[in-house]
Image (cartoon, rainbow, N blue to C red):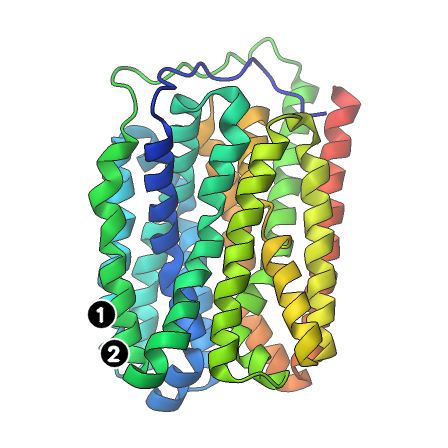
Amino acid sequence: MITTLTPGLPVRSSARHWPGIAATALTATVAGMPGFTVAALAPAIEADLHISRSTVGLAMSLFYAATALGSPVAKRVAARLPVPTVLAAPALVAAAVMMMASRVNGAGTLTAILLVGGLSNALVQPVAGRLIAARVPEHRRSLAAGMIGAALGAGALVPGLLVALVLPAHGWRNALLVAGIAALVPAALAPLARTPEGPQPARPKEAGVAGDQRRTVGRVLWLWALAAALSATGNNAVATYFVELGTHSGLGTTVTGNLLSLSALFAIAVRIVAGALTDRAPHRNSAVIVMMMLTGGLGLALIAIGTPTMFVLGAILAFSAGWGWTGLLLATTLRLVPGRSEEAGHTVQVGVYAGATIAPFTFGALSSAFGFPATALVAAVAAVAAAAAMNGGAMLLRRVG
């Protein structure tokens, strides 16, 4: 059972909060799209610019590294500036990044542009935590977090459509340009995410809380960030090399692009449905997350088999369940550290993007050396380890609860 230090944050305005949550989800989608789009278009980019798979993987790893490393600063920015301002910034930067990436002629320029996009992406999760804490009632927070977490699935949906519909006829440069134009839409919707004016809700007073409990909460946050990192490592690797994995399993490029979009739709649906259902019993969130991570590991193991049928089934499991836990983890950490909403978003973000940092370059290097099947099995093992870390944190909480 989740133990909190104090009662949850007071909701200062619960009316009409869903438009703001939708605007935040769209912003989260486009802020992460530079990494997903370059990943989906990687084979065409590599061939046109004459660069290796590992080089493109390193560029994408640095995008995610910038998000993880920029998260501490982003947490402070998100706590001080108006929510609409913080949301508009990453959407505008993502649009500029993808438009500029469509004109690059070398790996160095591409890497530098992605670094900027990664830094702006760091703003999203902390400000999302702040918005949920300020605007969403307690009994709807898992659903709200699930909608924002669905951005990871939606972030892969658009690149999949680009691979299937734009890339064959118009090339990767025009595909990136279309993605950049689409990223401008959430910036116009950012005003929908206004939070109440006035001072921020007070942080809980921790002076009277037992030191052992504070230390336990700190260890739990660390374990859950580790779980997020391990699970994201495997699933992000599959997302990064999805097209290449699909073609290696015997599927055509267009079919694989359509499957990427379909898998992303499953991922979106699972996050939203899981959020709505777990709001009825939020104390079970951690157990649901563990099961999702294990199911994602099973999907990765099926992908390792390397046949078209197993790839399709494994991809759906890895995307839907394997990534379905992100919103639930945000909602769970919000309940664990009430009054520190930016800290909750920061914890989830650091874990997810630390894993995403490791994934592209490592998976690219290992798959070049040992092949895709063996590397997919390594990713499956990481997912199992993630479930163990998540369960370990939940067990610590039960001991002090």
| Amino acid type at mark 1 | Met
Above or below for 204 versus 34: above
Near-viewer residue (360 or 186): 186
Residue at image x 60%, y 40%? Answer: 274
Nearer to the camera, 25 or 9: 25
Q: Residue at x 32, y 51 (%)?
A: 120
Query: Can you give x and y, in whole percent of width and height, for residue 63 in the image?
Result: 40, 62
What separation in Å lies between label 2 and label 1 (alpha carbons)? 7 Å
Residue found 64% across the figure and 71% down from its top = 312
* Helix, strand or loop under label 2: loop
Query: In the image, which disc is placed on residue 253?
Result: none
Kindly indicate the quadrant of the structure image that contains residue 298: bottom right
Label 1 near label 2: C-beta < 8 Å? yes
- Establish if 163 lies above or below 185: below
Instruction: Give the amino acid at mark 2.
Output: Val
Badge 1 crowding class, 10 Å Cα cut-off, few under 14, some 14 to 19, many 20 or more, is: some
Depth check: give the residue in front, 121 or 154.
154
User: x and y percent of residue 294 in the render?
Assistant: 74, 53
Left or right position of 99 against 60: left
3 vs 361, left or right, is right
Residue 78 can be seen, yes or no: yes
Return the residue at label 1. Answer: 100
Quadrant containing the C terminus in the rendered view: top right
Residue annotated with mark 2: 104
Q: In the image, is 36 to the left or to the right of 108?
A: right
Q: Residue 115: name its quadrant.
A: bottom left
Q: What is the x, y in percent for residue 98? A: 28, 66
